[in-house]
Image: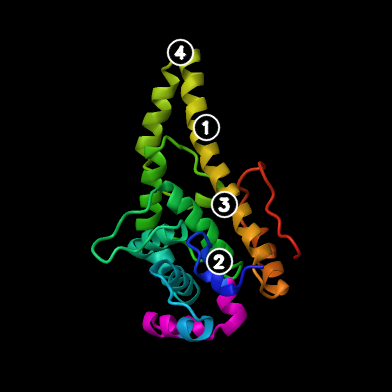
Amino acid sequence: MRSLTDWLDDETTYTTVMMAVMLDRYDTGFLGWDPTTLAMQLRDDFKFTPKDFTLDRINAGSVLLTTNLFHQSLETFSAICDVLNFGAISSEALIPADLDDCYWGVIEAKLLEGKESDEPFGDDIAGYVGVLLSEEGVLTPPAVLGFARTDPAEQANAQDNLSTLDESYFRVNWEKRQEAKGQLEAYGTARLHDLFQQLGAVPIGRKNVAWLKKQSKLLPPLTAAREPAVEGA
């Protein structure tokens, strides 16, 4: 069986899994640690030197659980979505999150925050995600991104353009847009399934895994392609 250190030192470990390990070990005491203290404590207790991705993911999870910045600051939202989707925080410049990053980031953030968090997203974030959806041709956001704000004039123009096509072109265009939305939903479902597979394997208290599984039921529907499951929960 892989150790907790193995999970914390693995670049493929989800933020939620790392947070579960930390909560299992420290309860909520670690949430106020600064990055230097976090790195030192991990070295002392888990006997390894944490890499940047480990510190980034735990810090991102801590920001989610202790502030409202994910919902109100576009810069924080973009950075956290990127980290949750296995990206890295750049010290030089903000790398804008793409649509996959935002979709998965909101899914995992909702899982971590739980039903207690119903704070709406700020206008900047809603507008930014709306632009990303429009660029991909997704006129109707997936339920997870239902907060996105799109330009009504742009949507009306797109619908008018569709309506002027003959039946065969309309069908192809419509199917293309539906395919883009379906691919996004399938991506989120596959990632959520993978996350719960990890949680089922990591050696932590099963009550934590069971709680997270319960939290997953609160997520808006993704797609019926696959049902998340946890082994041993």
Residue in the image at 44% along x and 21% along y: 163
Amino acid found under the numbered disc labelled 2: Thr
**Magenta stretch: dominant SS?**
helix
Cα separation, mark 3 vs mark 2, equals 12 Å
Q: Given this view, does label 1 or label 3 mark the residue nearer the observer?
A: 3
Q: Where residue 191 appears, x then y in whole percent? A: 57, 51
Q: Where residue 5 appears, x then y in whole percent? A: 55, 74
Vertical arrangement, residue 39 with respect to residue 2, above or below: below
Cα separation, mark 3 vs mark 4, equals 38 Å
Q: Residue under label 1, please give it.
A: 179
CA neighbours of label 1 inside 10 A, class few (<14), some (14 to 19), many (20+) = some
SS under mark 3:
helix
Q: Residue under label 4, please give it.
A: 166
Amino acid found under the numbered disc labelled 1: Glu
Disc nearer the start of the sequence (1/3): 1
Q: Residue under label 3, please give it.
A: 191
Disc nearer the start of the sequence (3/2): 2
Amino acid found under the numbered disc labelled 4: Asp
CA neighbours of label 3 inside 10 A, class few (<14), some (14 to 19), many (20+) = some
- Magenta stretch? 20-40
